[in-house]
Image (cartoon, grey):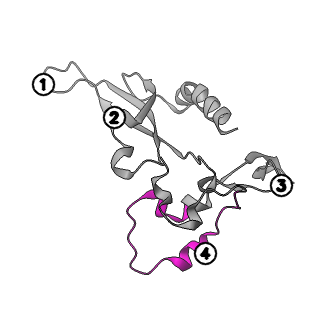
Amino acid sequence: MQHWRGNDPRNAAPENPPLPRDMQEWFNEMGPHTRFGDISQSSSWHAQATGIERGLHGRPERYVDVPTRNAALSLARLPLGLNLGLGADGYQVFKGKFAAGSYSANGLYIVVNNLPFYQRNLNENMIVTLVLPGPREPKRYAFDQMIEPLVDDLIRLAK
């Protein structure tokens, strides 16, 4: 699951994980013609923080990410550093000349971004978290109500 670490000592999981890497540091190390083969080579992979909590702060109040300890930690530098992606896709259930009308359904799924790119979207490595029945896509309020338990579970997982 941690294939992206390779032999690069900067990717090792140290005993005391450092702060997230600065995006400018990443940019300075990239050549002008560098091509990326995986999400772990992007600037945000090492800049993603964990150990933070979002809350309303300041005047006027606005949402801010605040470290829960002394400082935020680099997600990629933690021993596990699990990075998940949430996706959604819709499909028409009945097609063709015998279909009595259009009926679409939607699915929400989680992929583990730590897996190599060629394994990430295989059926056996995707977690279907929610199937939203049709006949049409849910409106915004209905969608929010349907995914609320999933969001609550993901927040608990992050803590």
Amino acid on which disc 1 is placed: Lys
Q: Is residue 109 left or right of residue 74?
A: left
Assign a secondary structure to mark 3.
loop
Which of the pair 46/92 is nearer the observer? 46
Using the numbered discs, state the Cα–Cα distance from disc 1 to disc 4 in whole angstroms.
57 Å
Query: Label 2 neighbourhood size at 10 Å, few (<14), some (14-19), many (20+)?
Result: few
Assign a secondary structure to mark 4.
helix
Which of the pair 115/6 is nearer the observer? 6
Q: Earlier in the sequence, mark 3 or mark 4?
A: 4
> On the image, numbered disc 2 is attached to which residue?
123
Mark whose residue sits in front, 1 or 4: 4
Q: Earlier in the sequence, mark 1 or mark 2?
A: 1
Task: Please give the range of residues in magenta.
Answer: 17-44
**Labelled disc at residue 82:** none
Q: Earlier in the sequence, mark 2 or mark 4?
A: 4
> On the image, numbered disc 3 is attached to which residue?
70
Q: Is residue 156 left or right of residue 46?
A: right
Residue 40 belongs to magenta span? yes
Query: Label 4 neighbourhood size at 10 Å, few (<14), some (14-19), many (20+)?
Result: few
- Vertical arrangement, residue 16 with respect to residue 156, above or below: below
Quarter of the view holding residue 132: top left
Amino acid on which disc 2 is placed: Asn
Query: Label 3 neighbourhood size at 10 Å, few (<14), some (14-19), many (20+)?
Result: few
Mark whose residue sits in front, 1 or 2: 2
> On the image, numbered disc 4 is attached to which residue?
25
Which residue lies at the image location 19% right of the left edge and 21% below the top edge? Answer: 99
